[in-house]
Image (tube, grey):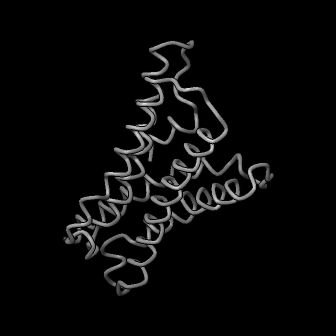
Amino acid sequence: MTTFGFLFLDGPYFENGPFKDFVDIIGIAIITFALTYLADYLLKYAPQSSITQKKAYRLMFSPMVFIVAVVLIITVIKPDYSSALNTGVQALFTLFFLGYLGISIVTLIRKFLRTEAAKRKEYGLDLMLLGVCFSLLPLFILFTINTINPGAEIPGDDYVFMGFALIPITFSLALNRYEQAG
């Protein structure tokens, strides 16, 4: 989750040129990998989701590769930016972002609800859910509202990103609790 700083702080500043393009591509790769890995981590975390045993699970990283390839192609070719191209690329990113963020949130909530109380505490699912509720869920709501109504003013939206500090803290505490119990 700490790699989201690249997204929200707009990465390092460079003048226009090949180096800026390279840094932008690396930034997109970091952001898409972070989202994909978050969903992957939550699917594999105890209790492991059954979907990880299926062959189709291997395709989980293909949208990330596709997005990075699209960004690379657009950066290298530098086509004329039309309204359709901008809308298409923005829709692609929005679907990816909301999709993988939604998968992460739903996976953790389902694990929490389907696990008995003693195991929740042992696995640290309560801590993880706390981190998700105060960081990822508000971000998901914010992006969904901004997708539906791009000009919407949402109270407190400037502070949503402060909740990201909870993710590494609560996930680390949960993992420590799980390792000590197991």
Left or right relative to 88: residue 115: left
Left or right relative to 56: residue 143: right
Viewport quadrant of the C terminus: bottom left
Left or right relative to 140: residue 3: left
**Which of the 4 image quarters holds residue 154?**
bottom right
Q: How many marks?
A: 0
Q: Nearer the viewer, residue 84 or 68?
A: 84
Left or right relative to 46: residue 139: right
Residue shown at 53%/26% (left/top)? 79
Q: Position of residue 20 (x, y in %)?
A: 49, 18
Residue shown at 71%/59% (left/top)? 148
Residue shown at 56%/52% (left/top)? 94
**Which of the 4 image quarters holds residue 133?**
bottom right
Query: Is 69 above or below relative to 152?
Result: above
Q: Position of residue 84 (x, y in %)?
A: 63, 42
Query: Is 62 above or below relative to 3?
Result: below
Q: Position of residue 37 (x, y in %)?
A: 34, 52
Residue shown at 54%/15% (left/top)? 14
**Which of the 4 image quarters holds residue 23?**
top left
Q: Nearer the viewer, residue 103 or 3?
A: 103
Q: Nearer the viewer, residue 11 or 179?
A: 11
Q: Position of residue 85 (x, y in %)?
A: 59, 39
